[in-house]
Amino acid sequence: MAKIVKKTVGSSSKKLSSSKTTKTAKLSAAAKTMKTSKPEKIINAKKKAVPEKELAVILLSGGMDSAVSLGVLLEKYEAAALHLNYGQLTENRELECFTRLCDHYGIKRRLIVDVGYLQQIGGSSLTDHKMIVPRANIGSKEVPNTYVPFRNAHILAIATSWAEVIGARKIFIGAVSEDSSGYPDTRPEFYEAFEKVIRTGTKAGGAIRIVTPVIKLSKAEIVRFGNKLKVPFIHTWSCYSGNEKACGVCDSCALRLRGFACAKAKDPIEYAENIFKSEIFV
């Protein structure tokens, strides 16, 4: 009898021990699961917790200055891209570059506006398709015949309206004061004055600001800055007259060519001619 009892007790001990081991193993496995895996709900909650970027309007002509300004914008904001067709000689090529830049950066919010009324403005020779763009004279202080009267004011007015509608608080524009000897609406004081107009004439008031990230840079500095930001210059256009190849002899081409050469960088677009006859110059 004693032997039977002893055997029974031993068997119960083994069962109890086995049960404890199983529970310990299950608890250990559960603890490991808790440490190594994250429930789907927690992951989704963290994804939702990431704040959305503030929206900003970029006036994207398709040129190198506006493309670099876009690169700056995207470091902090989500872009809403605005492009204007106003009868410029290279309208189709500029629109193509705008589309390619938007595609490259995955910009979904886009607005293309045709402002044909600029073609009717007297003295707006850039909108005359019979116009012959003169060879570059980048040292001249005269207003060139490619000047469109008060063009940037029209552009900024449309950008301001759109910004207020979509809730954007910044308008980026690739104005460069290096161009201001010929174009009075590329000077810093012009944008300071226009900000006062926005502040006075909109419901948003002073909430909408104009940002000119490259206005004080030379073309060479813009090229270096753009390369640092990995801006795809292959998708940009600066020429006033060419559509298949850039002419290489107008003011805009000359400034661009000089910028790339001084930055010791290669311009990825093709030119029909190079006014400087050399890749490197100062």
Image (cartoon, rainbow, N blue to C red):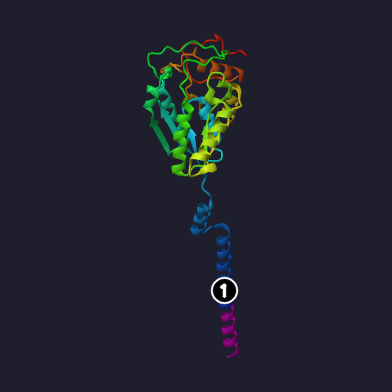
The magenta region covers 1-13
Q: Which residue is depicted at the point 54% across and 11% down?
A: 137
Q: Quadrant of the N terminus?
A: bottom right
Q: 110 left or right of 17? A: left
* Magenta-drawn stretch, dominant element (helix, strand or loop): helix
Q: Quadrant of the C terminus?
A: top right
Rendered view: 228 above or below 23? above
Residue 241 coordinates in the image, percent (x, y): 43, 16
Q: Which residue is depicted at the point 44% across and 38% down?
A: 161
According to the image, label 1 marks what residue? 18
In the rendered image, the residue lying farthest to the right is 282
Q: Is residue 96 magenta?
A: no
Judging from the image, what secondary structure is the residue with disc 1 in? helix
Q: Which residue is depicted at the point 55% across and 36% down?
A: 196
Q: 182 left or right of 115? A: right
In the rendered image, the residue lying farthest to the top is 277
- Local packing at callout 1 (Cα closer than 10 Å; few below 14, some 14-19, many 20+) is few
Asked whether residue 78 appears in the rendered view, the answer is no
Asked whether residue 52 appears in the rendered view, the answer is yes
Q: Is residue 6 magenta?
A: yes
Q: What amino acid is at disc 1? A: Ser
Rendered view: 277 above or below 95? above
